[in-house]
Amino acid sequence: MERTTLWDITGVDPDKARAVAAMRRQVATDPDRFWLDQAKRIAWDTFPTVACNTSFDGDVSIRWYEDGTLNASVSCLDRHLATRGDQTALIWQGDDAAISRKLTFRELHSEVCRFANVLCGLGVRRGDRVAIHLPMVTEGFVAMLACARIGAVHVVLFGGFSPEGIGERLIDSGAVAVVTCDTARRGAKRVPHKETIDAALSHAGTIGAVRNVIVVRVTGDDVPMKEGRDHDYTALVAQASPECVPEIMRAEDPLFLLYTSGSTGKPKAIVHTTGGYMVWATYTVDVTFPSEPDTTHWCTADVAWITGHTFVVYGPLSNGTTTLIYEGLPGWPQAGRWWDIIDRYNVSSFFTAPTAIRSLMRDGDDLPRRYSLASLRRLASAGEPISADAWLWFYEEIGQKRCPVIDMWWQTETAGPMLSAIAGAQPLKPGWATTPIPGLFASITNEKGEVVTPEGEAEGCLCFDSSWPGQARTIWGDHKRFRETYFTFSPGRYFSGDGARRDEYGNLMITGRMDDVINVSGHRIGTAEIEDAVATDHSIAEAAAVGISHDLKGQGIVVFVVARSEKVAPPVGDLARIISERVGRYAAPERVYLVNELPKTRSGKIVRRLLRKIASGETDSLGDLSSLADSSVVPALIAQVTAQS
Ligand code: WT7
């Protein structure tokens, strides 16, 4: 712990600190002026006259820049053509080190227009949803911007979702088309993308609204193509024009839906709209990762996550920054691939997740020392809490004590970083996400949602007091769930679902989720999703999933199941397989325990706190058991878990 006294090591520049303080003052006194100024960062067809029109009360209505009109792809592409048309916009590094591709802003513009024309030709219209289910290849990037170009709403689906998971999301979003690929490379393995989509579309005997499937040839593996429905990406694009007039959208028209997990088993599609999101993406990337003319920005997030949307695609491009994507795994075919890529392309801004940092630390310090890494100027981490140890390793071994490490806290719902140090303007503190970025006001409340300690040291629930342009507008098709999840806990505030601690200087540290959400390697999974999957096995009476601490993944999943009758209890291996199949392989549990009974309160609620303790082996600190309906369940449970461990 003593090492955390290093926390102001990267220094503070008084001019920068003054500039940031001035921004904070402006938002406090004239928020409309501040946010209309930020709106100038992007290209509009009609510049808005109002900034925010939001109410967190009543039915909850969030609107930004509502009389503005624009097309998101113009900010990312067209407006750069005159000044930096020949600058590289996108670098793609293939899994094979010998294969890579660079696209200038001009080339990317043409590719986006071609594919936008392809989508139009297939009958995709403004407001239609288009699912994108691809690995890290340029076509995924192009497809997102092509949707934006024609006003279609993209729904990027993670490659790790099961066919069922994808089918459910295709139906929920009402997607009319899917962009996928033959197969994807994952180390020595192949991920069957097309097969997964075929299975999803035949799932439950319905294809929902999907009329067209466009297949990118990533590996060249042979896949069946369905006449009339499936199309070859390259063949379509080859015939399409490289010019496409952008569709002019209203600021509050949806730009994309993105699925995430919450406290119920049903995944929710978070809705982000065009004007506010684009301003927010452009602002947050620039304020946290300021771009110099030769910046090459590499955020290792998959584009299927919000981090990918904002910090790989929209934010860097809108700022005119070169952005890099890598098809492969960090340690394939040998450790050090990431460091090689940093040297090869002179990456200056590097942004990754704590789970990756923890696994890279295991390769030892010698490995990164074999690379120069001299191009790096800024580092960032987000997605889960980063320990002070991992922070220091990243700072010392990768940043070579030259580069600030920014711990950013954000969510699918926030679309961009909410808590983040502004390097140079304030001290950094390992393990702490520090302060709200200029424009935001955070509160720590007690468990009833009340602010008891407005300033100084406090611990409780993390809320935000006012809206921001990139705030989620609703949950697709379920505004009631949106209101209830985020706005009823502390009336007048946005409740994040996370716990946080504040130090005497106002720095914030995230203590973890307060709801039934588990964060496995940065993947957010609702315990109910796992329990619902297990419940599809009819021999199971009930199940409870909990998250326990895991060295590499941050959290791992442990599932407790009660069989309907001892005679028909399924092997635990089958249950683990069901979870991987139904939810996705990223949700595979560490352990499944078959037990006779679960600990419950008198009102019948499962006491997960106890299960977590038992699963972590902390049986000597179980705490007060008096709220249990039957406390004799506990010793029996411990005995069964011990016998199965
Ligand atoms: C949840 C949101 C970078 C956003 C991508 C994840 C956890 C996120 C941090 C951080 C501690 C963090 C929170 C949050 N989280 N960043 N820097 N420190 N925890 O978006 O999948 O919607 O997950 O990730 O628990 O609520 P997401």
Image (cartoon, rainbow, N blue to C red):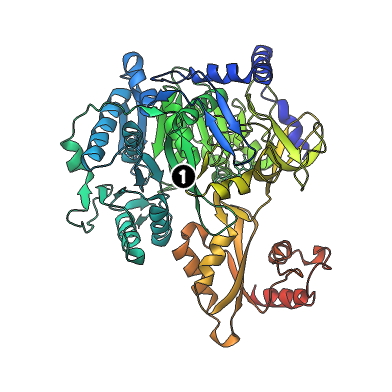
Residue 447's place in the image compared with 349, above or below, is: below
The residue at 63%/40% (across/down) is 58
The residue at 69%/35% (across/down) is 430
Ligand number 1: quarter of image: top right
Q: Is residue 644 left or right of residue 73?
A: right
Give the residue at mark 1.
258
Given the current orientation, which residue lies at the most extreme top position? Answer: 15
Q: Nearer the viewer, residue 183 or 329?
A: 183
Q: Quadrant of the image for the N terminus?
A: top right
Q: Is residue 394 visible?
A: yes
* Residue 281 screen position, x and y as percent: 49, 29
Question: Which residue type carries mark 1?
Answer: Leu
Q: Quadrant of the image for the C terminus?
A: bottom right
Q: Nearer the viewer, residue 504 or 117?
A: 117
* Residue 13 screen position, x and y as percent: 66, 15
Question: Secondary structure under badge 1?
Answer: strand
* Label 1: few (<14), some (14–19) or many (≥20) C-alpha neighbours in 10 Å: many
Q: Nearer the viewer, residue 569 or 208?
A: 208
Q: Is residue 95 visible?
A: no
Residue 119's place in the image compared with 477, above or below, is: above
Q: Nearer the viewer, residue 95 or 195?
A: 195
* Residue 139 screen position, x and y as percent: 31, 39
Given the current orientation, which residue lies at the most extreme left position? Answer: 239
* Residue 398 screen position, x and y as percent: 56, 34
Given the current orientation, which residue lies at the most extreme front position? Answer: 58
The residue at 48%/43% (across/down) is 305
Q: Is residue 457 left or right of residue 374?
A: right
Residue 53's place in the image compared with 615, above or below, is: above
